Image (cartoon, helix red, strand yellow):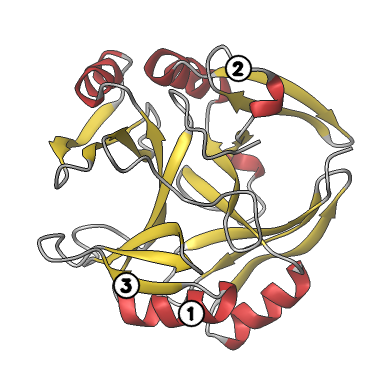
Amino acid sequence: MLTTRFVQGAPNWIDLATPDIDGAATFYGGLFGWRFASAGPGTGGYGYFRLGDKRVAGGMQTTPEEWPPSWAVHFKSSDADATARTAEEAHGSVVLRPADLKGQGRTAVLADRAGVPFGIWQPGPDKGLDLVQAPGALFWLELYTPDIAAAAGFYHKVLGWETASVTYPGGIYTCFNPAGQSEDTMFAGLVPLDEDPTKADAPYWLVYIEVTDADAAVARAQELGGSVLMPATDLPDVGRIAVLADPYGARFAVIKSVPPA
């Protein structure tokens, strides 16, 4: 499960690229109760979504030429420059070279072998998200990819991730956990792209946000101008999930999780 005890390779941040940050703030505020505020001068318009006093995500306004509307995932790296080099050696690519960010840490944007972008964050004073695994916060991740084995090999080499298989009524679900950690630290699943219920035409990372009622979240998202890509569905021993898109096309999922046995 996700925690804010960020170990090497663990997810430690998510953020939104959107063509309308004010409109996105209204949407996610109405859906999850988030409040958006600037991160301060010199940040290029970047800001934080907060739930109460806890940072649960970041976001900024971008043009379609800069970045399509989407949610991005960032993972902890103890050395952003070394991780970027390893990504290239593993047949991935570096989208944005490592750079210091206002003395708070060092960041880069990479892409895996299938071209899926993801971020890395080498923490300084800023360690990452303040809240996970709670209503209105990040709960889980999924990678939709055309080649499970290739993705597993890439992320193992670059971030040290280990995989475990979980059997469910429909088959086998492959999960990631940080290197050297037990399987109860799993934070993401891998899904073949051709099994994506939303029929995406390119591989991507999907973020799951915990909610108290998945059906209510779906209805509220629609009221706020979002769309439903997969209606609320029960997954035995997991919870009730739905895949949505905000008014600008950024896709994400909601889950009312089942408490672990």
Q: Residues within 10 Å of mark 2 (few under 14, many from 20)?
A: few
Count of numbered circles in the view: 3
- Left or right of 148 in this view: 231: right
Residue 41 drawn at (x, y percent): 12, 66
**Secondary structure state at the residue bearing disc 1:** helix
Q: Residues within 10 Å of mark 1 (few under 14, many from 20)?
A: many
Q: Position of residue 227 (x, y in %)?
A: 58, 75
C-alpha gap between disc 2 and disc 3: 35 Å
Name the residue tied to disc 1: 27
User: Which label sits in the foreground, 2 or 1?
Assistant: 2
Check disc 1 and give the amino acid type. Phe
Report whether 223 appears left or right of 130.
Answer: right
Q: Which residue is mark 2?
A: 181
Residue toward you, 189 or 104: 104
Left or right? Give the position of 11 relative to 15: right
Return the x and y of residue 168 as percentages of the image width and height. 85, 33
Q: Identify which amino acid the numbered label 3 is placed on.
A: Ala
Q: What residue is rendered at 44% in x and 64% in y?
A: 250
Q: Of the residues under marks 2 and 3, which one precedes in the sequence?
A: 3
Q: Which residue is mark 3?
A: 37
Nearer the observer, disc 3 or disc 1?
3
Contact (CB < 8 A) between labels 2 and 3? no
Label 3: few (<14), some (14–19) or many (≥20) C-alpha neighbours in 10 Å: some
Q: Is residue 148 above or below residue 54?
A: above
Disc nearer the start of the sequence (2/1): 1
Q: Residue at x 83, y 50 (%)?
A: 258
**Could you tell me how far apart the alpha carbons at marks 2 and 1 are, in whole angstroms?**
36 Å
